[in-house]
Image (cartoon, helix red, strand yellow):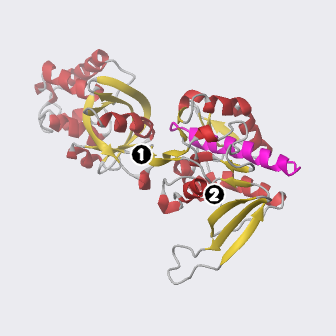
Amino acid sequence: MPGRKILSTGAGKCNLSNTNITAGHYHGGTPSFAARVLKALPPGKVLDFFGELGLLLSAEPNGRIFPRSMKASDVVNVLVNRLKEKGAEMRLLTCAQSVKKKLSGFEITVRQVPPKWDKKAAPGPLRTLTADAVILAAGGPAYPQIGGSALGLDLARALGHAVKNPRPVMTPLKIKEKTVRELDGIRLEAVLSVYAGGRLMGSERGELLFTDYGVSGPPALSLCRAAVAALETSTVTCRIDLFPDHSRETLFSLLAKRRDAGPKRPWRNFLCGLAEERTVNLLSSALKIEPAAPAGSVKDPLLAGFAGLLKDWRLEVAGSLGFEDAMAAAGGVDTAEIRPETFESKLAGKLFITGELLDIDGDCGGYNLHFAWISGLLAGTAAAKQKGLRC
């Protein structure tokens, strides 16, 4: 179906851009490539494009931009509607087997492929298409279960481009401590910081999702790159602050006041309403505080230790998940071989390479989709101009 990956982004809501699109949020690529791209088509122009398609947008306080309806399907629908208005032909379930540069343009060999759910269907015969210009917009190998693959990279390599082997980025983090399994499925607001050898690698605030293998959610996805790179040379630790709006001192005072107001209450009742139940119970058990113990029996040193855990809960990172759970892929076509103003290949005229096929990827928060839009708009406009068409 059209836009299969778009439909899955942002938990089905499609975080399509960000109010803070700058070159500093992109990684890989040759120096200044991202800056030159953003100069060629400023972020506001991309948002204007969606506005012209009829899509109303909504920006959250953290800068993430969504369709106002919070439905990724609306993003896909406005794009498909424009394709139909322009008379474009969509060939679904069609795979490009090869793209060859000819003197007069390009020759593309394609084959109709059966859907994955139809085990008995056979692939169709090979067919040849000709084109004046070709745009490779095949995405990368992230999320193969919804269509991600390295086929686009194979096509670019066959056309003479240097390709850096892809690797998964923006993936959940695996945690060594097995106790996190007890929190599987819990979501909570926190600040996640990653340290390598005692040095801060990055810090992000947002919704953390605990899983049976570790932590996910936007903060973990954003910090995955730094964590995995640091694992090659040192021990990496996640430090979670469950009360980012309180200092350790003010949190201890809050807990002491709460304890002294009801010293005979069982500790389990003391915890009720403080924070997510399973999480505070797990941290209490780490300090060997019995659930039935009176709150008043938890003296200041132990209470200070509990406050310390709430502010600085440390977990060791064991690694990250693979392409099946990655939001994006790093690596791809060398951007030194691509013109940033048009995304045209420097090696083959009228060949354009866009989006995740390139060795450049963005942070979590709408940056990768924005790069997909901007590269597609620039490439499409340039390809149409070469044919004397108007976009």
Q: Which comes sooner in the sequence, label 1 or label 2?
A: 2
Q: Is residue 123 above or below residue 385?
A: below
Residue 273 visible in the shown view: no
Q: Which residue is mark 2?
A: 3
| Residue 346 on image: x %, y % | 68, 43
Q: Position of residue 50 (x, y in %)?
A: 74, 43
Q: Nearer the viewer, residue 377 or 310?
A: 377
- Residue 267 is one of the magenta-drawn residues: no
Element on which disc 1 rests: loop
Q: Position of residue 55 (x, y in %)?
A: 73, 46
Residue drawn at the location 14% of the way across and 24% of the way down: 302
The quarter of the displayed image where residue 90 is located: bottom right
Q: Residue at x 39, y 33 (%)?
A: 226
- Image x and y of residue 376, in percent: 70, 46
Q: Secondary structure at mark 2?
A: loop
Instruction: Name the image quarter holding the N terminus.
Output: bottom right
Q: Is residue 268 left or right of residue 376?
A: left
- Residue 171's label in the rendered image is 1
Magenta stretch, main secondary structure, is helix
> Looking at the image, which residue is at 48% across and 60% down?
144
Residue 196 shows up from this direction: yes
In the image, residue 373 lies in the stretch drawn in magenta: yes
3D distance between C-alphas at marks 1 and 2: 21 Å
Q: Is residue 30 left or right of residue 41?
A: left
Check disc 2: other Cα within 10 Å, few if <14, some if 14-19, many if 20+: some
Res. 193 image quadrant: top left
Q: Which mark is residue 68?
A: none
Kind of residue indicated by mark 2 = Gly
Q: What amino acid does circle 1 point to?
A: Thr
Highlighted range, magenta: 362-391
**Are the residues flagged by discs 1 and 2 in contact, CB closer than 8 Å?**
no
Q: Residues within 10 Å of mark 1 (few under 14, many from 20)?
A: many
